[in-house]
Image (spheres, rainbow, N blue to C red):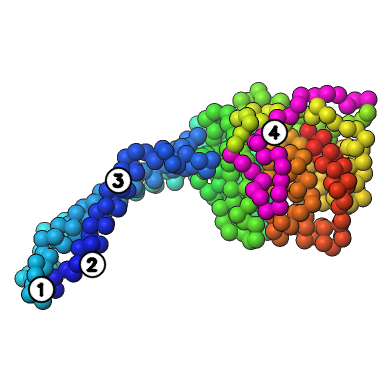
Amino acid sequence: MRPSKSLTTLARWSSAVSALAGLTLLSGCKFWLDGHQSTIEVAGPVAADQRHIFYVTCWVTLVIFVIVGAVLAYATWKFRARNAEEENILPANQESHGNPLIEVGLIAASTLALVIIAFPTVRGIWYTYEVPAAERDNAYEVTATGFQWWFKFEYPNEQIENVGHLITANELVIPAGRPVHINLRTTDVIHSFWVPKLAGKVDMIPNRGNSLWLQADQPGYFWGQCAEYCGDSHAVMRFRVIALEQREFDEWVEQQKKPARVVAADTAQAGEARAQFASLKEWRRNAPGYTDKYDVAPLDAWRQHQHPDANEDPALIAQGRKLFQEKTCVACHTVRGHEGVGIGYPDLTHVASRTTIAGGLLENNPEQLARWLHHPDEVKPGNKMYVAGYVPNEIKLSDADVHALVAYLESLK
Ligand code: CUA
């Protein structure tokens, strides 16, 4: 049977799509694939290797697509029905079955295509699996643990006297220009650790010790995301990676090892005014807690978060610290040196030095923190702070309570 008109149309459309796909690849996708979580605009060797594999696969399949599309278009055109009579005439010799040249040729071409893809893929699997031997002694070690829905980061080599090792949450700070080996763990369900600009995703699986390595070539601020469906708030289980020069990283470690600040009336001093991370200062219910309109570059905003606020109110902070005990927050959150002792939830000893809160979802500023404390269930549906904290303990926070708690938490630099 001759190809019908709809088949001819299909062939034309597939040629157009193929041309568009080719143009997109040729343009390097730079115009519209350079977002925060781009795997095209990468910032380290592991992600670059994975991008290379992606490109090789794309080019090979593009060649196949163009050849098959061209043959289809040619056959559709060449053997089309030119009038009503021809609609019912079968062409002679419809099949290539029994043509050894075509059959062997197609098998050989397919094998060649697979070999071309297999070489960089197998090499890439070995490369990205473990820090290269020559660099292994230089690698920095951290452990990332997934929780519904946030990430805990541990620094096993940064010991704090009489305490153990350094623990933070949701913002992984690493040295730049150095491989970082990350042990991946989970306490509940399967999560997946993904920093698109630095390395492809690896699952965090219960009772299985996975790991990955990555390296940020330059200091920078990178967006991460849980990449495995893990329940209600999977889509908002985010984190950040902050890469710093070794010296600045060492300073950060020393600062983080210290116990929580105590802001007494006589020690309160005007520190550097903290720039907002973004232009998002007000909040509305159900509005995004985040914007891409930055006042300052994200890494600079992160640096400014390391300094105390200019207008601290010691009395209000003290009141917030008291509320932090009375409202039972202390049972779930560690604030080293203060009353907080809980270990199952994010360590808040230096929470104000982070640029984000609520699992990387909200910008860390007083307004968004107030929003989080007022409506945790709306911000991150199903989260444990609400279902295992607020609800069973009947925690009610007045505006004044939230005001004081915000002052306290924002003082924890
Ligand atoms: Cu954790 Cu999705």
Amino acid identity at mark 3: Gly
Q: Secondary structure at mark 4?
A: loop
Image point 7% across, 75% down: which residue? 85
Return the x and y of residue 302 as percentages of the image width and height: 67, 32
Q: In the rendered structure, which disc, 2 or 4, sits on the residue that comes first in sequence?
A: 2
User: Real-space Cα distance between discs 4 and 3?
Assistant: 42 Å
Q: Secondary structure at mark 3?
A: helix
Q: In the rendered structure, which disc, 3 or 2, sits on the residue that comes first in sequence?
A: 2
The local crowd at label 2, few if under 14, some if 14 to 19, many if 20 or more residues have their Cα within 10 Å, is: few
Amino acid identity at mark 1: Ala
In the rendered view, would you say 114 is above or below 55?
A: below
Residue 393 seen in render: yes
In the rendered view, would you say 382 is above or below 291?
A: below
User: Real-space Cα distance between discs 3 and 2?
Assistant: 24 Å
Q: Is residue 284 magenta?
A: yes
Residue picked out by circle 1: 84
Return the x and y of residue 309 as percentages of the image width and height: 79, 29
Residue picked out by circle 2: 6
Q: Nearer the viewer, mark 1 or mark 3?
A: 1
Residue picked out by circle 4: 276
The quadrant the N terminus occupies is bottom left
Magenta segment: 266-292
Q: Nearer the viewer, mark 3 or mark 2?
A: 2
Residue picked out by circle 3: 22
